[in-house]
Amino acid sequence: MSLSSRMIVVLTSIGLLSGGLLVGVDILTKERIALNKKREIEQAITLVIPGTKTSQKLYEEKDFAVYGGKNEQGDMLGFAIQTFAAGFQDKILLLVGMNPALTKINRLFVLDQKETPGLGAKITSDEAFLKFWENKECTNPLRLRKPPVASAGELSPSEVNTITGATVTSEAVLNCVNSSLEKVKRLKEEGKFGGDGKNGS
Amino acid sequence: MEKMAVKSLAHDFSKGLWQENPVSRQLLGMCSTLAITNAVINGVAMGLAVSFVLVFSSLLISLLRKLIPSQVRIASYIVVIASFVTMADRFLAASFPSISKSLGPYVPLIVVNCIILGRAEAFASKNTVARSLIDAFGMSLGYILALLILSAIREVLGSGTILGYKVLGTWFEPWVIMILPPGAFITLGILIALANKIEQRIKLGR
């Protein structure tokens, strides 16, 4: 066999073999990976809407989704908004848990972020950031408290804490939550979630 | 004769640990080494993923070494390496989603990790399957050890924890810089300087 045909045969067969192998690997792992993603979101929803037994996607567009959480009896317990903020480094994927009337934020959860470790990355920490977001009134846009306070009790109901040294990240999260809230309220008025969102129809 | 063979096999293995350690002596694969050693768990996961790819690609490449024409060898090696990397990546995503998430793009980037292509070109393509495997195991272990040391220093000083458990009390204010890129460069620099110093001592002692 001439050299060039040998080169073609060897490289083609290596390529075909590895391609075939990878198809097998993909078939074996595809379901698990999809399940992991789904489970991650479901777990986060139970966290931001306490008491949730079943959740359901009510609305979806690019980088934005709304889930509804229901208890065993099928009563609507609240909404979870999946949205993203333009962080310091990359997108911050957030899940915001709301009450059914969209007047109160239950909790915030960070699904994914690539902020600076030790500074902006503190948004994933309960102690440093997330606890200051629990049970916030949000009929009006939320505001940042600067400089930050030590305990959640010192904040007014519509104020949230800043992270020292990570103002960009804190502001990004705040602006994202505020604009997502407005959007969700508008969507709800337009009846995009089916029914009035309270009886869980 | 047999003694010689055993001795050279032992050398094939042990050279990866110190004399030709991929991180401290060959300075290969620095990009991922610097990037993922901010926590011990990441260092271990990365070390294992690289070891898996290194061992299996060394095995396959030394098996195929007589079949592959030298003109297309690099392309062939890369295809083989990329297949194993994809397998490792999918396995991590399926079984250890949180580790896969924290390693991010650095798992797929093992494809271009110089340690693996370097061993394929410098060793597996010229030696028997047995020797290539032993060489790959030695290099893997050397790489894992280097990552372990690096990530342990960075995690203790940068977060005050080891594998997520608090080892330093509340009095310790973590040095954030240690888990940021500069901390990686500083720690690696000091470690390489230390390795050089020790190597010098060994040589002088002879």
Image (tube, rainbow, N blue to C red):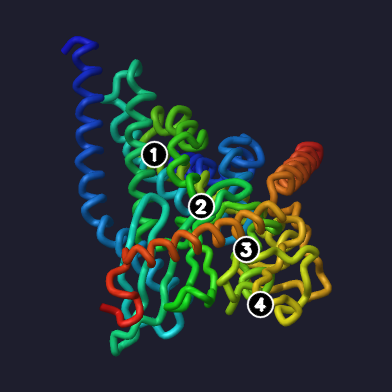
Q: Nearer the viewer, mark 1 or mark 2?
A: 2
Disc 2 marks which amino acid? Leu
Which residue is the site of mark 2? B103
Give the class, few, some or many, for how many residues have Cα within 10 Å of label 2's Cα (few <14, many ≥20).
many
Q: Position of residue B149 (x, y in %)?
A: 66, 55
Q: Residue at x 38, y 50 (%)?
A: A62
Which residue is the site of mark 1? B58
Give the class, few, some or many, for how many residues have Cα within 10 Å of label 4's Cα (few <14, many ≥20).
some
Q: Is residue A50 left or right of residue A131?
A: left
Front-most of residues A137 and B110: A137
Q: Quadrant of residue A138?
A: bottom right
Label 2 secondary element: helix
- Disc on res. A123: 3
The answer to whether residue A113 of the structure is visible from this angle is yes
Label 4 secondary element: loop
Q: Is residue B171 left or right of residue B154?
A: right
Mark found first going from the N terminus, 1 or 2: 1
Task: State if disc 2 and disc 4 touch (CB < 8 Å).
Answer: no
Image mark 4: chain: A
Q: Quadrant of residue B193?
A: top right
Disc 4 and disc 1: Cα gap in Å?
61 Å
Q: Nearer the viewer, mark 4 or mark 2?
A: 4
Disc 1 and disc 2: Cα gap in Å?
24 Å
Q: Residue at x 63, y 44 (%)?
A: B34
Q: Nearer the viewer, mark 3 or mark 1?
A: 3
Task: State if disc 1 and disc 3 touch (CB < 8 Å).
Answer: no
The answer to whether residue B163 of the structure is visible from this angle is no
